[in-house]
């Protein structure tokens, strides 16, 4: 098998459903010949299944030791937080998972400061990604969070509505926070070449139905829990591996990612922007939509800031004025 790289990829939370699916996806994509599976619970069972799948010329290591897991790692994907349960929002996981993110960032700084890219997917991903970035000492474009799942939920909802393939739905994007306050942008969407804005408000797609679809998209994670009795694992695992593939210099990532933003308007925050992912990291620009969409993005940012400020109150992160002392890149 030809690999995209021989650099070490460490998957954090590998004993869980998301982590084990990430391992399989990475191997099926042929990303690297060096994969380390790390968890506080032994991921050896996952490693054995991967070996028994017959993947050729791959060194698969399973460990519960942080130093072994992170030493010499060049790429990291982490799902190593508590999952959502029925009735929970992503924000309900804030304090506990951000403490886990703090430890992750510290392990990166201690054992693999030369890591090239880190993808964070455990919720609330915007905040856990921000905390990881702060304590890792990495540059902003080197740490990204899963945001594409919200966009694929919009894309799939529109594809089902209009009876077309998802590839025929173009221009889908959700921005801001990965949560129920996200901003759903429909102004750039086309359906088999037709502008969505020309269809909304017609008998084919009443405005009320579009508004309900946007709400349903923002609650897509809760719907999976309702349907499956557990939180999403296949979709976030696959999309996160697509992200790390792009960071490795492989096929471009198709959807927005969460990235560190520092502008006059959006400051010291991790949020989904219009992004490109390359081997040099994530680059972003501020998306522009309708006045209503832009206002929704502003509201999402404000919500993220409240959660960030709560982390200061909880002493998980210091005041923003002191961040540069921990990570000079910020």
Image (cartoon, helix red, strand yellow):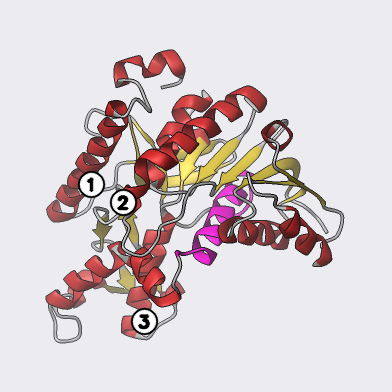
Alpha carbon distance from label 3 to label 2: 22 Å
Residue at 41% across / 41% down in the picture? Answer: 96
Label 2 sits on residue: 175
Where residue 30 appears, as percent x and y from the top left, is 73, 57
Q: From which residue to which does the magenta span run?
A: 231-252
Q: Is residue 328 visible?
A: no
Report the disc number at residue 94.
none
Of 314 and 49, nearer the camera is 314
Residue 21 magenta-highlighted: no
Residue plotted at (13% across, 52% down):
291
Query: Within 10 angstroms of label 2, few (less than 14), some, or many (20 or more) residues?
Result: many
**Mark 1, other Cα within 10 Å: few <14 / some 14–19 / many ≥20:** many
Q: Quadrant of the C terminus?
A: top left
- Above or below, 301 against 149 in this view is above
For discs 1 and 3, the disc positioned in front in the rendered view: 1
- Residue 178 in picture, x, y percent from top left: 34, 51
Q: Which mark is residue 300?
A: 1
Asked where in the image residue 190 lies, by quadrant, the reply is bottom left
């Amino acid at each position: 098998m030809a690999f995209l790289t021989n650099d070490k990829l460490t998957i954090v939370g590998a004993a869980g459903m998301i982590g084990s699916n990430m391992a399989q996806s990475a191997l099926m994509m042929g990303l690297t010949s060096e994969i380390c599976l790390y968890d506080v619970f032994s991921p050896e069972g996952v490693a054995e299944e991967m070996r028994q799948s017959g993947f050729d010329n791959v060194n698969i290591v399973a460990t519960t030791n942080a130093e072994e897991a992170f030493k010499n790692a060049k790429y990291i994907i982490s799902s190593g937080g508590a999952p959502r349960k029925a009735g929970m929002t992503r924000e309900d996981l804030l304090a506990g998972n951000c403490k886990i993110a703090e430890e992750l960032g510290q392990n990166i700084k201690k054992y693999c400061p030369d890591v090239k890219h880190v993808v964070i997917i455990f919720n609330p991903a915007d905040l856990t990604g921000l905390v990881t970035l702060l304590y890792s000492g990495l540059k902003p474009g080197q740490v990204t969070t899963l945001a594409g799942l919200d966009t694929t939920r919009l894309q799939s909802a529109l594809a089902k509505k209009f009876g077309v393939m998802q590839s025929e739905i173009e221009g889908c994007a959700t921005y801001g926070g990965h949560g129920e306050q996200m901003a759903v942008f429909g102004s750039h969407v086309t359906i088999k070449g037709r502008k969505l804005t020309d269809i909304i408000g017609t008998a084919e797609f009443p405005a009320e139905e579009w508004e309900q679809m946007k709400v349903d998209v923002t609650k897509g994670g809760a719907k999976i829990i309702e349907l499956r009795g557990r939180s999403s694992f296949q979709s976030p695992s696959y999309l996160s591996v697509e992200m790390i593939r792009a960071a490795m210099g492989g096929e471009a990532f198709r959807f927005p990612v969460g990235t560190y933003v520092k502008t006059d308007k959006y400051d010291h925050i991790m949020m989904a922007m219009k992004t490109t992912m390359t081997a040099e990291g994530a680059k972003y620009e501020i998306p522009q939509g309708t006045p209503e969409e832009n206002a929704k993005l502003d509201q999402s940012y404000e919500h993220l800031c409240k959660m960030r400020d709560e982390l200061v109150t909880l002493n998980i992160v210091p005041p923003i004025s002191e961040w540069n002392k921990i990570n000079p890149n910020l």
